[in-house]
């Protein structure tokens, strides 16, 4: 690439004298009319030509290409940084939103947990009250059942006591009429009275009354009333010999003890084995 420079001075232009740097007099050329001053023509300066080598052109092109690549990389890096910054902002914003939502849910969960604990405590208290109420009701029901049973037994006890003399008369009539075996009328009478006696006793048994007829049983002062003693060497000592009057028991309570006679002079009754002692013996026999 050639570069040329030239300077041309216009013809007839007056040239101002340059000041003397030493401060001396200044010479001024004066033009006189009618006189022509020969034109001063400056010689053209030599044209300087710059020659560019091919290597320099290739170097400049490589430098320009490197500058373009550097600029492109800078733009890409700037775009990546801008994208990362935007992504970071989005992530932070989303993370802040999630944290806020988490905190809100944690608060709600804490409130729900408190409500659950309160509900559990209330349910436990209600269950305890229900258990106490159920226990009180069971105790009341058992007490009322026991009281009703006692009242019923008292009512039946009065009825049994009122009927016992009539039952005793029926039994004595049966015993007295049974002695006349040859009398057919007396026999029929005995059969009728016996049937009536059985019906009355069955009614009492339905009401819970039990007959105490201990003939041949060991004497029990809680259920028997001894009215006499009979010597009998063949029977065990303290054994019921005769029953003059049957006793009655109602609901485990003795309404009237049986009137009996008790033997004496015989051998002692052997002790009966207890249930706890009898079980091992039964197991040994099984083996």
Image (spheres, helix red, strand yellow):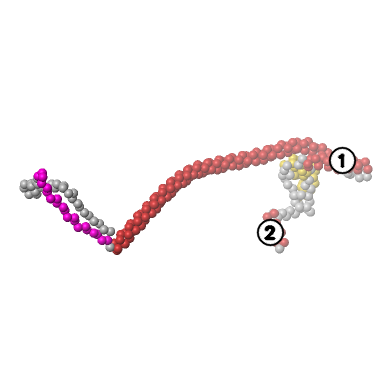
Residue nearest the observer in this picture, 220 or 125: 125
User: Is residue 117 or residue 140 the one in the foreground?
Assistant: 117
Secondary structure under badge 2?
A: helix
Judged from the image, the secondary structure of the residue bearing numbered disc 1 is helix
Q: Residue 146: x, y in percent?
A: 69, 39
Q: Count the marks: how many?
A: 2
Residue interval drawn in magenta: 32-52
* Majority secondary structure in the magenta region: loop
Query: Residue 99 in magenta?
Result: no
Is 3 in front, or is 87?
3
Image-based side of 97 in relation to 247, left or right: left
- Mark closer to the chain start, 2 or 1: 1
The image quarter containing residue 151 is: top right
Q: Which residue is mark 2?
A: 280
Q: In this rendering, would 98 be left or right of 261? A: left
The quarter of the displayed image where residue 43 is located: bottom left
Is 39 one of the magenta-colored residues? yes
Q: How many residues crowd mark 2 within 10 Å: few (<14), some (14–19), many (20+)?
A: few
Q: Residue at x 74, y 44 (%)?
A: 223
Residue 132 shows up from this direction: no
Report which quarter residue 149 is drawn in: top right
- Determine the residue positioned at 19% across, 55% down: 44
Q: Is residue 210 visible?
A: yes
């Amino acid at each position: 690439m050639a570069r040329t420079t030239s300077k041309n001075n216009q013809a007839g232009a007056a040239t101002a004298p340059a000041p003397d740097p030493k401060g001396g007099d200044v010479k001024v050329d004066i033009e006189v009319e009618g006189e022509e001053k020969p034109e001063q023509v400056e010689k053209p300066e030599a044209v300087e030509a710059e020659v560019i080598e091919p290597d320099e052109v290739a170097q400049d092109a490589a430098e320009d290409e490197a500058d373009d690549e550097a600029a492109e990389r800078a733009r890409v890096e700037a775009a990546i940084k801008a994208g990362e910054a935007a992504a970071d902002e989005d992530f932070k914003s989303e993370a802040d939103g999630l944290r806020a939502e988490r905190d809100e849910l944690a608060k709600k969960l804490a409130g729900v947990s408190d409500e659950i604990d309160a509900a559990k405590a209330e349910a436990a208290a209600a269950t305890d009250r229900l258990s106490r109420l159920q226990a009180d009701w069971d105790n009341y029901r058992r007490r009322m059942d026991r009281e009703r049973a006692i009242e019923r037994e008292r009512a039946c006890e009065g009825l049994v006591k009122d009927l016992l003399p009539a039952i005793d008369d029926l039994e004595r009539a049966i015993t007295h009429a049974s002695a006349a075996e040859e009398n057919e009328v007396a026999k029929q009478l005995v059969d009728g009275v016996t049937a009536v006696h059985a019906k009355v006793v069955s009614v009492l048994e339905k009401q819970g009354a039990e007959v105490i007829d201990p003939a041949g049983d060991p004497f029990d002062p809680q259920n028997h009333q001894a009215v006499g003693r009979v010597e009998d060497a063949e029977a065990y000592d303290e054994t019921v010999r005769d029953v003059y009057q049957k006793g009655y028991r109602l609901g485990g309570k003795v309404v009237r003890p049986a009137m009996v006679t008790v033997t004496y002079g015989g051998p002692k009754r052997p002790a009966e084995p207890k249930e706890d002692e009898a079980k091992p013996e039964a197991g040994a026999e099984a083996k």
